[in-house]
Image (spheres, rainbow, N blue to C red):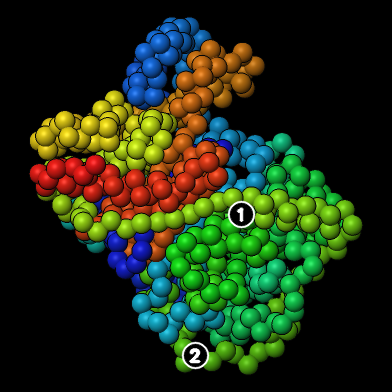
Amino acid sequence: MVPRLLLRAWPRGPALVSGAPCRPLSAGTGPGQYLQHSVVPTMHYQDSLPRLPVPKLEDTIRRYLSAQKPLLDDDQFRKTEQFCKSFENGIGKELHKQLVAQDQQNKHTSYISGPWFDMYLTARDSVVLNFNPFISFNPDPKPEYNDQLIRATNMTISAIRFLKTLRAGLLEPEVFHLNPAKSDTDSFKRLIRFVPSSLSWYGAYLVNAYPLDMSQYFRLFNSTRLPKPTRDELFTDEKAKHLLVLRRGHFYIFDILDQDGNIVSTSEIQAHLKYILSDVSPAPEFPLAYLTSENRDVWAELRQQLISSGNEETLRKVDSAVFCLCLDDVPIKDLIHLSHNMLHGDGTNRWFDKSFNLIIAKDGTAAVHFEHAWGDGVAVLRFFNEVFKDSTQAPAVTPQSQPATTDSSVAVQKLSFKLNDALKTGITAAKEKFDATVKTLTIDCIQFHRGGKEFLKRQKLSPDAVAQLAFQMAFLRQYGQTVATYESCSTAAFKHGRTETIRPASIFTKKCSEAFVRAPSTHSAGELQQMMAECSKYHGQLTKEAAMGETLFSVLSLTGQGFDRHLFALRYLAAAKGIVLPELYLDPAYGQINHNILSTSTLSSPAVNIGGFAPVVPDGFGIGYAVHDNWIGCNVSSYPGRNAREFLQCVEKALGDMFDALEGKPIKT
């Protein structure tokens, strides 16, 4: 299992990250075929994006050792230091030289892109819980628009408007604005559109704006991950015009675009969805969707049997569909039920291999569940935000809208699959495995209301550093140790960038955590404040090396100088060249730091209610969090052997203790 760029934000109402880095959601154009008509072409900056730098080997080794320091005792650290010196002066030096040469020969992409695709596509674990996350939408502010049929119709049409706007080159380019007063203006856009694409990035850079890579966006639609033996494939068919709808484990398709590529009339789409919702057929005895939750090699073999049994054309319709709309028959009870339903559900009503599933529950609660191999959070969150904005501010249908008087039984095709005994046995086995696995997952969440970003900034502390410090204190209190911790960061500021890692556990967080947890009475409030300030300063340094600035989609790297991806690429290159794995990678400390017990990610957006993901290792926690202006939200998942509820209680205690120290109060033991 691997760390991922994941998207999180917490309950309800506006939660936009404050400050300059946030790009406002694009100005829409009202109902119609397009969401917007950008003055600047969508891919205008793509050709001139800077390339992801390969860090210097000595810098990577130095950063790696700094991250190992709080996790190892002195003897272990000395051994790891020796492995690093041997690597840096020996095989690592040669591998680095080859990586740089290879990178120079492939200037159209990044050094991490190919290996990262391979890492995802060669993984044989189920995509469910191991890779696919979800993000859920806030409710429509107008309650009557949360009716399942109304919301499904509006979100579907907004999603197709996004597709058409993207493909027409009318979607505003994704840009990270450090000074939006200068760069996010009509006058700048009118000027930059005339700068050639080969130079346009430099024009944006001059006004402190950073265009982001948009090469993944085309995979949002008409795309599916196909299971294959040893390595899966990504499939895209942009010619297909139909929508896939799942309900009660049944598969339906209908054309959402006409022969000219225009969106089918809204009243027809509403009529077709109403027709599907009115189907009283019982759930199938052998729901095919379970197969997408299987081990990838098992699923690959069963898929081949499906094709051999005469289902090739039907599967092609599933794979090529614009996207998968899942209409659930169950209303959402609370945030924990929401997380379970959107992260995995009951396995019958998702096609987990689709680039994304748009899920609408019985009560109109909506979410996006997405497959991770094709891309990262930047593309998904942009789509998510635009769909929420368009469907709530320029809805295609109202509660008073009448569906078309069309014969949906002709337009809507219900797919049927030919299943032999071997396939039925395979589906039954997949269901048993799925049920047993999801039963082991616990999810819980808290909200801390004593303060948030505003208070912490007045104390001259990084809000993100304080949240990460709380996780370190919580784990130390609960389990008595400091462990490998991962904070996701995007390298989308570079051509074909993917993700990088910030390592929040440091010698500073370890010292501070031990003071708060083990001996708070021996330190004055001033001393505790000083230790927190040291942690904040060091976290800021890490963030500047790997990442600069918090954005709508987690942390964005503007330097590309983390160590994790560099070491990963060198290891990948050694394997590709048939070189014996260098000792650095056989060191137990390397395995330990990549066994991310605390996998963390943050996001705030006005569209997001809550998001979720499973732990990336069996004995870990999956931690989503957001520091809002006046409160802090945290959502945690765990498997047996770890206790999410208890961990959250320790997080709450840690935050309370830090706020007490900042207010000059004694720490309660």
Mark found first going from the N terminus, 2 or 1: 2
| Residue at the front extreme of this rendering | 669
Direction from residue 300 to residue 369 in the image, left or right: left
Measured from the top left, where is residue 520 in percent x and y?
20, 35
Q: Quadrant of the N terminus?
A: top right
Measured from the top left, where is residue 604 in percent x and y?
33, 56
Would you identify the image quadrant in which residue 53 lies? Answer: top left
Q: Is residue 48 visible?
A: no
What residue is disc 1 on?
439
Residue closer to the observer: 68 or 196: 68
Direction from residue 471 to residue 529 in the image, left or right: left
**Kind of element beneath mark 2:** loop
Determine whether 526 is above or below 353 in the image.
Answer: above
Q: Quadrant of the C terminus?
A: top left
Marks 2 and 1, how far apart at CA:
41 Å
Measured from the top left, where is residue 156 in percent x and y?
53, 72
Q: Residue at x 79, y 67 (%)?
A: 285
**Kind of element beneath mark 1:** loop
Q: Residue at x 55, y 32 (%)?
A: 115
Residue closer to the observer: 611 or 655: 655
Measured from the top left, where is residue 364 in percent x and y?
49, 76
Q: Is residue 82 visible?
A: yes
Determine whether 31 is above or below 533 in the image.
Answer: below
Residue closer to the observer: 632 or 385: 632
Which residue type carries mark 1? Answer: Lys
What residue is disc 2 on?
401
Would you identify the image quadrant in which residue 572 lies? Answer: top right
Q: Residue at x 57, y 83 (%)?
A: 270
Which residue type carries mark 2? Answer: Ser
